Amino acid sequence: MYRKKTAGLLAGWLFGFVLSLQAQLHPKLIVVVVVDQMRADYLDRFASYEHGGLHFLATQGANFLNANFEHLPTETCPGHAVLLSGRNPVHTGIVANDWYDRDTGKMMYCVEDANSVVIGDSGAAVSPRNFLGENFSDWLQTSYPGARVFSISLKDRAAILLGGHHPQSVLWFSHETGRFITSRYYADRLPGWVEEFNSKRVPDSYASKEWTPVMGDSSPAYHTREVAGRFPHVMPSKAGRELYDRVYGSPFGDEVLGAFAESAATANQLGENPRDAPDLLAIGFSSNDAVGHAYGPDGPEMADEQIRLDRTLGHLVESLSARLGKENVLWVLSADHGAEPTPEAELELDHNRSARRIPFSDALNSMEKQLSAIFRITGDVHWFAGQADSMLYFDRAELARHGISLAAASRALVTQVHDVPGVAGFYDTSRLASVPGWIGTFLRNSASTTRSGDVYYLTKEWTLFSSKSTGTSHGDPWPYDTHVPLVIAGWRIQPQRIKRNVQIADLAPTLASLIGVHSPRLEVVDGRSRKDWLKLRAHTDLKQP
């Protein structure tokens, strides 16, 4: 009897030991938070006003202080594609938000897919089919059968490019209806929990609401040069496209997405996987980008956006921690690109006297006039069939009509066109192997032989190509656009501030090595695992019975 009782106790202990060991080998839930257009300096700049989710991540996680993208253009689509794939645009194929498709003669949206119509709305047909290869979401499901992947955002491209090829759900916000929707690539109909959330009409609750400084006008957080806009910003009074656009372009959009994220996690019991596999929830907060484009990175609107986002994330951290325990959730914080300071702010604060804002048409006109002079062509010539950020596509039919080869046109643009407003230089996409220095590395990381332009152009530092008189943009390979936050927190991660340089492509292989994800695709990533740089809490010591 004693032996049977001892054997039973031992079996029970072993069972508990195995379960405990499994729990320590991987987190129950991985939450990847990507804040569109979040500059790295925001974490420190607003630290004294934040006590929620951003504060938790920045102070309790491994904070990589010098994390940069190494490609151009620095835009939403390429950035999101790099983040969880560990591969640069040359390998993901996502070379820009849009690129010129030489076969169709039209611009191609990065997630465009005519065969994947939208479910729940009449928006553009989209899917991840333009994304080449796999990302961490796919590796996770290969290594842990039963792992569930959910990816949500206000932007379709953000949700799609974080979600991989085989997620359970990928959902984004419709500006037409204020609902969260998906495409037929993922499902034939919206899940019940999404329909239930949509029925609450959360965005409509912001009708007539005033966006005012959450900490009050007198807070030092808002004592900065106001680039554009004046508080309060009043939301439209009626439900509809105008209201949904304005909600999207304010911190209220973050609040809507935060509530949707909590619904996704609760309704699907993320982190309580019946097959003891880690679940993944990717969240793309897009409103920060809209605020930056409208008001710039240095005004009180951006300060309020960040402070409110901290609170929104704080609610999510508290909700997931209460249900799963903080030690069972692994958090990641990063961004898809940074943002250029507005030239007006740079000049007024006397930070940089070379800062300027010019319309891209000025640069384009200069290029075309010089090319016409070089080839002694009179009259109007349509030199370019397409233009994407940092890329130019020659009109090959027009070149043929004038007896000019593509090589000759590219060579002329690179070597003979000078003093183009706002342009520091041109680079022939077919001859990037010989380009020296950091710009050569960036270009080779970026260029696809089938999707990239014939020539890349490098915008001068502190030049903002914009026809608007306010706000900012991004897309260049300068530090203000490439330098973004990178934080890994929760689970076994101990707080530390890491000053060594990393590229954002290092994130995916680092996550993979942290939780034991294996895939043949990991052999061809551009990034490197930085697990060895992290301070990890030891596995819990289990006492002998």
Image (cartoon, rainbow, N blue to C red):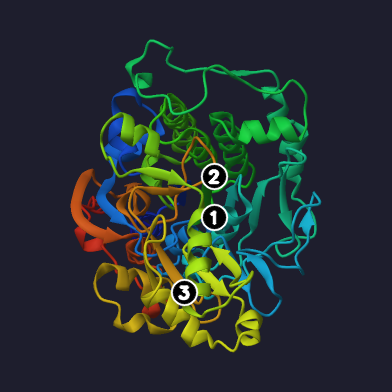
SS class of the residue under badge 1? Answer: helix
Q: Which quadrant holds residue 20?
A: bottom left
SS class of the residue under badge 2? Answer: loop
Comes first in the chain, label 3 or label 2: 3
Q: Nearer the viewer, mark 1 or mark 3?
A: 1
The amino acid sitting under disc 3 is Val
Residue 282 seen from this side: yes
Mark 2 near mark 1, Cβ–Cβ under 8 Å? yes
Q: Is residue 306 left or right of residue 283?
A: left
The amino acid sitting under disc 2 is Ser
CA separation in Å, label 1 and label 3:
17 Å
Rendering coords of residue 132 (x, y %): 54, 75
Above or below 162: residue 53: above
Q: Which residue is mark 3?
A: 455
The N terminus - image quarter: bottom left
Query: How busy is the neighbourhood of tag 3: few (under 14 within 10 Å), some, or many (20 plus)?
Result: many
Q: Give the total of numbered labels.
A: 3
Q: Please give the name of the residue rendered at 56% of the width and 65% of the height, measured from the top-left corner.
A: 387
Q: Is residue 24 left or right of residue 184?
A: left
Above or below 373: residue 126: above
Q: Which residue is mark 1?
A: 361
Rendering coords of residue 340 (x, y %): 39, 45
The amino acid sitting under disc 1 is Ser
Comes first in the chain, label 2 or label 1: 1
Q: Nearer the viewer, residue 518 or 355?
A: 355
SS class of the residue under badge 3? Answer: strand
Rendering coords of residue 4 (x, y %): 39, 60
Q: Which quadrant holds residue 388?
A: bottom right
Q: Which quadrant holds residue 539?
A: bottom left
| Circle on res. 467 | 2
